[in-house]
Amino acid sequence: KNQVEQSPQSLIILEGKNCTLQCNYTVSPFSNLRWYKQDTGRGPVSLTIMTFSENTKSNGRYTATLDADTKQSSLHITASQLSDSASYICVVSAMTGTASKLTFGTGTRLQVTL
Amino acid sequence: EPEVTQTPSHQVTQMGQEVILRCVPISNHLYFYWYRQILGQKVEFLVSFYNNEISEKSEIFDDQFSVERPDGSNFTLKIRSTKLEDSAMYFCASSEANLDQPQHFGDGTRLSIL
């Protein structure tokens, strides 16, 4: 069964600090790995998408890494801001025939405080 | 920036009634999706739709569910006879292509079954 596990479940950091969120997956056949940000009461917003051959990808202060051998990914947030407070969801795409099917993690709830 | 819009934002329905959730995907997108998120749980894939037919569906998407693209802009999810456990946030998403392209999510419809 395809699964995506994230840690920590929740995290509180001071504004300006960095943090790293973790994701482990067992999804087959692997197509790509995505990180989404979900603000409370809103739909998820795509941050990065990485395919099998990509080890790292950045989007502003967000940097995602992928180790396809160990099936692990991380999302590093640099110089956090209050607006970074949200849930960060790791999503792995499996290719099934002509369609891709997304498996979502439960997310890491990040709170950035003053 | 174009966005996916969903209506209504909140729908309250009596158990056993039919409900239709509506979505307007981004205009040049070709792939459409429905997801649900039960309160406090992870996002779950329901169905993907391309070229006027279902391309993939999950085990959640049983005979009570159906999707339709009645015209060039709307994409709907119908639940024929709602159950209490259908209470959830339902997200619509769309993408330009299937592989390695971000899915753009709407802000969801909160469905409450009484």
Image: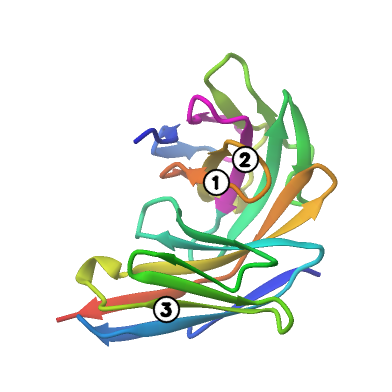
Disc 1 residue crowd, few under 14, some 14–19, many 20+, Cα 10 Å: many
Q: CA distance from mark 2 to mark 3?
A: 28 Å
* Marks 3 & 1 on one chain: no
Name which quarter of the figure residue A103 lies in: bottom right
Q: Which chain does the numbered disc 1 sit on?
A: B
Q: Residue at x 62, y 35 (%)?
A: B32
Q: Which mark is residue B33?
A: 2
Q: Which mark is residue B103?
A: 1
Task: Tell me, yes or no, whether the two marked residues, 2 and 3, touch with CB atoms within 8 Å.
Answer: no
Residue A9 percent across, percent down from the top left: 48, 82
**What amino acid is at disc 2?**
Tyr
**What amino acid is at disc 1?**
Gln
> Vertical placement of A62 versus B71: above or below?
below
> Vertical placement of A42 versus A98: above or below?
below
Callout 3: helix, strand or loop?
strand
Q: Report the front residue among B1 and A25.
A: B1
Say whether residue A72 is magenta.
Answer: no
Q: Is residue A59 left or right of residue A91?
A: left
Q: Residue at x 56, y 30 (%)?
A: B29
Q: Is residue B53 left or right of residue B100?
A: right
Q: Residue at x 42, y 62 (%)?
A: A37
Q: Report the front residue among A21 and B37.
A: A21
Q: Please give the range of residues in magenta.
A: B15-36
Callout 2: helix, strand or loop?
strand
Q: Earlier in the sequence, mark 2 or mark 1?
A: 2
Task: Tell me, yes or no, whether the two marked residues, 2 and 1, touch with CB atoms within 8 Å.
Answer: yes
Q: Which chain does the numbered disc 2 sit on?
A: B
